[in-house]
Every structure is written in C-alpha cells, then in structure tokens.
Amino acid sequence: MGSISQKQLRRLMYYKERLDITYKEISVRSGVPESTVKKIITGVTKKPHKKTVAEIEKALGISDVLRDEMAKDDCLRAKASQEYVYGTEAEDTINYERGNYGDKTLADYYALPEDRRAELIDGVIYDMSSPSFVHQEIISELVYQIKDYIHKNKGKCKALPAPIDVQLDCDEKTMLQPDVVILCDDKKNKNRCIFGPPDFVCEVLSSSTKFRDSVLKLWKYMNAGVREYWMVDTDKKKVICYFFEQGEEAMEYGLEDDIPVKIYEGKLKINLKDI
C-alpha cells in the first residue's frame, strides 16, 4: 500500500467526469468492487493498493495517456520571455489571443509528472518555479487575515492558499493555481478543483511569473468573471488591486497601507507591513 497523491486523486476525478461514467461501470471495467472504486476516487481510502489504483486508471484510460506522454519529448514546456507590464494594452491582448492559444488540454495537464508544478492557460502549459520564503509568508498572512475576518463575521466564503486547481473557464484548455482565492459559491467546489471563477484572487509576483500574472492571467481573470484581483509586488513593495465588478481602474497601495477588500465593501482591510 502507499498514499495516493492529490494529483492522482484529482486525475481520477477528472477522468470520471470526462467520461461521464458511474462507479458501477468503472467497477465492471476494472474488476474492482464498486464500493472500493467509490472510496478511492472520493478520497475516503487514503492508502489504497497500488495495483487497485492501476486497475482503475486502466479502466478510465489514464494508463494509455500516461504511457503516450512518457514516450514523447519534453515538448510541453513553455515560457514567456516578454517584459511584463501592469495592465493589458489592446495590442497585448490581440497578440495574446493570436499567439498563445495552444493544443494542450487537461488530459496533458493531468499526465504531467507528480513533481512538476505547472499551469495550463488556453492550451499552453507553463512551468512554475518553487516559491520563495517571502512569497509563502505573504500567502500565509493574507489567508490568516481573510479567514480571521470571515470567522469573526460568521461568513460562508472560504479563503484558500495554493496549491488549489481552478478550472477558470470551465473548459478543457485552462487550469490555474492562484496563490490565494476566496470562494463564496460552494457549488463551484468540485473537490478536485474550483470549477469556474472564484470571487477574489491574489497572485504574489516573482521574476518568473510577472508577465504571466500581470498580463495573461489579468486578462483571463477579468474576462472569466473574477470580481477582484490583487497582485503583490514585493520588489516594488506595493499591491495592485483591480475591482472588476464595478469596472474600476487599478489602485496601488504600499505594503504598509490598510488595503480594502472590495468584495467585502472595504470592511475587511489587509495590512502587510510586518512582512
């Protein structure tokens, strides 16, 4: 026996949804008892037999996909070399739409090795580097302050840190891993991912993600229906905030400022001066 990874679990859930197949049908195909199939795919069984998981993966067609991917060259890697800017000019958006739409799907995303961190944006897979200590410290502080506010006000929204998959456009071409999200519609919680736009997203910029976060993902979040989007720039010690719901221009704050969270009408204020 061995612990099933979160990526394996999300992959099983994805293929079950994709095939629109019942636990009973998976049981018939795999030879694994229906109750066992259900417990494994729903995450109830934490340490299933590897052979049992392999039989379920075979029944769902996952084994064939993984084998085909292993036979390929490492051609999924994609990096953006453009200099980033705050905001998306019309020309940036046009070039993005014309030149950055790839042919990769969630099947390719779920076929990536367990130790490879990546995002899928409009059919292109982008590698993600390991976060820095400051990056993680900011995420932890944001989530702590948001959760504290929600708890004190008996709110129903959930504040979640990375890694959390977000199937932003509800299609097969995009799966993001924002640094922090606030989700208020529990119907979008599909266990394996958030299915659709969260209410609030924050990305902590790094040298490897600045272009992607401040151009590509800004454009994606705005058009998908995210209500509020923050970018924390530790180099310039500022936070850039967009409140898409009311079409406001970007607002900039210092880390020492009390920054209002607009989805809470400014009643929640975040301060990062101690970071």
Image (cartoon, rainbow, N blue to C red):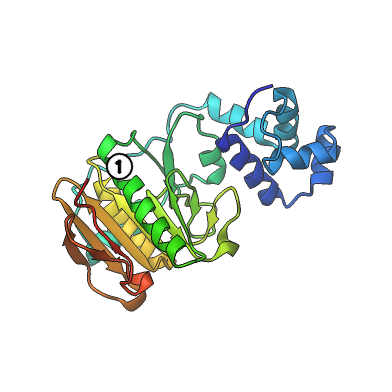
Residue on which the image places disc 1: 137
Res 198 seen here: no
Residue visible at 84% across and 40% down?
A: 34
Tell me the quadrant of the picture where the N terminus can be found: top right
Res 245 seen here: yes
Label 1 secondary element: helix
Tell me the quadrant of the picture where the C terminus can be found: top left
Using the image as rendered, state which of residue 49 and residue 259 is in the foreground: 259
Using the image as rendered, state which of residue 3 and residue 246 is in the foreground: 3
Residue visible at 52% across and 65% down?
A: 156
- Coordinates of residue 112 in the picture (x, y in percent): 51, 33
Q: Quadrant of residue 89?
A: bottom left
- Coordinates of residue 68 in the picture (x, y in percent): 59, 29
Query: Which residue lies most toward the left here?
Result: 236
The amino acid type, in three-letter code, at marker 1 is Glu
Callout 1 crowding tier (Cα within 10 Å): few <14, some 14–19, many ≥20: few
